[in-house]
Image: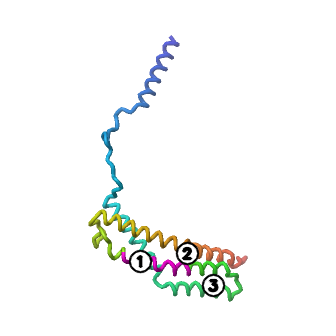
Amino acid sequence: MKNIFKKMILAVMTAALVFAAVPATSAFAQGENPPTTNGEVSNEKLEKAWARQLKLYNNLGKGFEDIDAQIAKFQKRIDKAAENGKDVTALQAALDAFEAALKSSKPVYDSLEAIVNAHNGFDADGKVADAAQAKSTVQALGAKLKEVKSSMDGTGKALREAFKAFREANKPPKSDS
């Protein structure tokens, strides 16, 4: 009796495992021929990409606004530290590299203005008017933004890191109170 009961439990458990592994319904959502996009991008995605790129363009513009004043501000801080006897060679090198990168990137940034002002494929509100033109505009602006980024070559981040390292190395000693 025990042996029959064990076999029956084993058979029921096996059947339960088989039914659990097989889905109850079939997935035929796409049909026989799934749709192809042929590289098409929805208008909504184009509009989001355009808005994101415009934001980057505007933020870059703030950085390029008064390059000489920014460089002078950094140079003043470095000169003051040097007057106080601090080693500023790493800071000066980072600032020089940043300044050179900014000046070489400025013409590339200036070329972005033509693309933004023309906004081919987009209306004044940033909505897609012609999807093909909008896609090429987004691609062209994206390529120029990448060009600006590569011409900066991480010098802004290197300058921030150099100032951070300088501050860490020159922390005033803690006083025991």
Residue 22 painted magenta: no
For badge 3, the amino acid type reads: Ile
For badge 2, the amino acid type reads: Gly
Give the magenta range: 99-114
How crowded pointer 3 is (Cα within 10 Å; few <14, some 14-19, many 20+) is rated as many
Find residue 159 and report its horizontal and vertical position in percent: 59, 76
Towards the viewer: 15 or 94: 94
| Residue drawn where x is 49% and y is 77% of the image | 105
Local SS, label 3: helix
| Residue drawn where x is 36% and y is 55% of the image | 39
What secondary structure prevails in the magenta region? helix
Determine contact: label 1, label 2, CB under 8 Å: no
Find residue 24 and report its horizontal and vertical position in percent: 36, 32
Residue 111 painted magenta: yes
Residue 165, placed above or below residue 131: below
Find residue 107 and report its horizontal and vertical position in percent: 46, 80
| Residue drawn where x is 50% and y is 71% of the image | 149
Reading the image, the residue beneath label 2 is 156
Reading the image, the residue beneath label 1 is 111
Left or right side of 120 for 85? right
Q: Nearer the viewer, mark 1 or mark 2?
A: 1
Residue 114, placed above or below residue 137: below
Reading the image, the residue beneath label 3 is 78
